Image (cartoon, coloured by chain):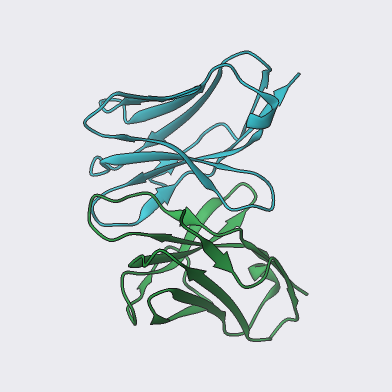
Chain colours: A cyan, B green
Amino acid sequence: DQQVKQNSPSLSVQEGRISILNCDYTNSMFDYFLWYKKYPAEGPTFLISISSIKDKNEDGRFTVFLNKSAKHLSLHIVPSQPGDSAVYFCAAGSTLGRLYFGRGTQLTVWP
Amino acid sequence: DVKVTQSSRYLVKRTGEKVFLECVQDMDHENMFWYRQDPGLGLRLIYFSYDVKMKEKGDIPEGYSVSREKKERFSLILESASTNQTSMYLCASKGGGGRIYEQYFGPGTRLTVT
């Protein structure tokens, strides 16, 4: 059973607007959450992360919000740019070492 | 910068062939991972390794085996390739310690089995 879920397979946003990508998880033992970005024919690259002791982490145009009670996190991209068009993977981990990935959301930013 | 390299970007093999996918990392990382990525299914963990000569099954180990003889190298082996193993294969590594979570990925190998 999937422990990390990204329920929207795709998202289309106009350039300059906000992109919001969502992720839900089921395992309360997860204590760290990450977002990866993947372009076609390339490996995923780390984007931003958040520890379970925080509810927000910001890095430039990217902000991740964590709602532990709802077991939900979201990635906000403001403003969105065409170069942000990629597949975004949410991942969760614990001290056991491995990460659990969602199925990804294809973000398309159009001019 | 961490560098993870994979032996081939594209590979075409025939059904029944034995296939070796090689991964090398240059950061002295203890942990290495093999995933496959398929459309709509995300990244699925095949095998991982916490140390040399150690391996753990991931979520979809059937039809695969691995080898870790040296710390920097982690090999994925398809014993008898089948068409349903056509996929993008991604290797990743991460440092040791329970509080280190970020994995670094290689560029991937697009394997086609005909």
Labels in figure, total: 0
Would you place residue A27 above or below residue B114 in this image? above
Q: Which quadrant of the figure has residue B26?
A: bottom left
**Left or right of residue B47, residue B20 in this image:** right
Q: Position of residue A61 (x, y in %)?
A: 51, 22
**Viewer-proximal residue, A1 or B28?**
B28
Going 25% across and 57% down the picture, which residue do you hit?
A96
Q: Residue B63, relative to residue A71: is it above or below?
A: below
Q: Where is residue A62 in the image (x, y as percent from the top left)?
A: 48, 25
Q: Is residue B16 left or right of B36 when viewed as pictured?
A: right
* Front residue of this view, candidates B111 and A85: A85
Q: Residue extending furthest front?
A: B1
At 32% across and 78% down in the image, what residue appears? B54
Position of B27 relative to B76 (above/below): above
- Does B74 sit left or right of A81 as displayed? left
Task: Report if residue A27 is visible in the image.
Answer: yes
User: In the displayed structure, does residue B59 sit left or right of residue A44?
Assistant: left
Residue found 41% across the figure and 66% down from its top: B32
Q: Locate residue B60, reporting x and y percent.
A: 48, 66
Viewer-side residue, A14 vs B97: B97
Q: Quadrant of the C terminus of chain A?
A: top right
Q: Can residue A1 be seen in this view?
A: no
Q: Farthest residue in the top direction?
A: A17
Residue A80: percent from left, percent from top: 61, 20
**Quadrant in the picture for residue A23:** top left
Asked which quadrant contains residue A24, the reply is top left
